[in-house]
Image (spheres, rainbow, N blue to C red):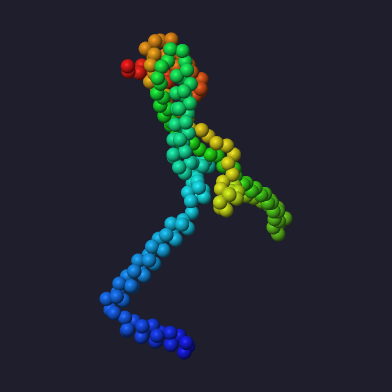
């Protein structure tokens, strides 16, 4: 206790001996440095987005946490389809736009617990009664992730449904070329013809 009192007394004596203006400046500098250290620490210790588990939709499917993943996959498909269509005889420059009715979804696995119990009772009058109870419980199954958390076990991935396809191409004024483009799109994307629109590109 005497040691602590001695340290406190020395600090008081040091403060009393300091210039008041200089003391305020030094205190402000220390506070600013402390705030910077706290902010830097919170940023560095914040977990990455990849460690977060995706939320679940009602109905048992897992929806993508980042819609950009679906957008990136759609962009890649448009680029590949554009490259493919430009190789068709009579087709020049091509632009492709694909729209989707929903985002990509994942179907999770479930842990199911089922139990059956039965009891028999008899009363004083010689009557018997049988009782049967069934218990059913289901919960989404999780597994350990590389980040150390938990992630749902995915049974299958449902790709987004194509809502429509727009193709703007040179050479589309020719009926045969337009039919070739339509047929190629319907085969690649497995969509009906009425969902594909091919338009002549301006010259």
Residue 137: tell me if it is visible: no
The location of residue 162, given as percent across then percent down, is 46, 28
Residue 8 locus on image (x, y percent):
41, 84
Given residues 197 and 128, the one toward you in this image is: 197
Report x, y in % for residue 15. 34, 81
* Residue situated furthest bottom in the rendering: 2
Q: In this view of the protein, which residue sits in the foreground, 38 or 61? A: 38
Query: Residue visible at 39% across and 87% down?
Result: 9
Is the residue 82 above or below the residue 42 in the image? above
Please tell me whether residue 36 is drawn above or below residue 175 in the rendered image: below
Q: Nearer the viewer, residue 60 or 171?
A: 171
Residue plotted at (51% across, 33% down)? 159
Report the label total: 0
Q: Position of residue 130 (x, y in %)?
A: 68, 51
- Which quarter shows the C terminus? top left
Picture layout, residue 149 above or below residue 155: below
- Please indicate, yes or no, whether residue 94 appears anywhere in the rendered image: yes
Question: Residue extending furthest right?
Answer: 126
Q: Residue at (57%, 37%) from the top-left corner? A: 156
The residue lying at 53 percent from left, 34 percent from top is 158
In the image, is residue 110 above or below residue 93? below
Left or right position of 125 against 33: right
Q: Residue furthest left?
A: 21
């Amino acid at each position: 206790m005497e040691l602590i009192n001695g340290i406190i007394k020395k600090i008081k004596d040091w403060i009393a001996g300091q210039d008041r203006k200089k003391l305020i400046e030094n205190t402000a500098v220390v506070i600013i440095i402390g705030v910077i250290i706290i902010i830097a620490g919170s940023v560095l210790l914040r977990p990455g987005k990849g460690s977060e588990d995706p939320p679940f939709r009602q109905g048992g499917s897992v929806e993508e946490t980042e819609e950009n993943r679906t957008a990136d996959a759609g962009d890649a498909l448009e680029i590949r389809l554009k490259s493919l269509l430009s190789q068709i005889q009579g087709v020049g420059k091509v632009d492709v736009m694909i729209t989707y009715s929903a985002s990509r979804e994942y179907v999770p696995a479930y842990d199911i617990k089922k139990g059956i119990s039965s009891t028999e009772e008899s009363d004083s009058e010689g009557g018997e009664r049988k009782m049967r109870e069934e218990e059913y419980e289901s919960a989404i199954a999780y597994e350990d992730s590389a980040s150390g958390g938990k992630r749902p076990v995915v049974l299958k991935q449902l790709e987004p449904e194509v809502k429509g396809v727009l193709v703007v191409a040179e050479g589309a004024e020719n009926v045969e070329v337009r039919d070739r483009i339509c047929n190629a799109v319907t085969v690649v994307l497995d969509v009906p013809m009425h969902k594909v629109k091919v338009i002549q590109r301006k010259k």
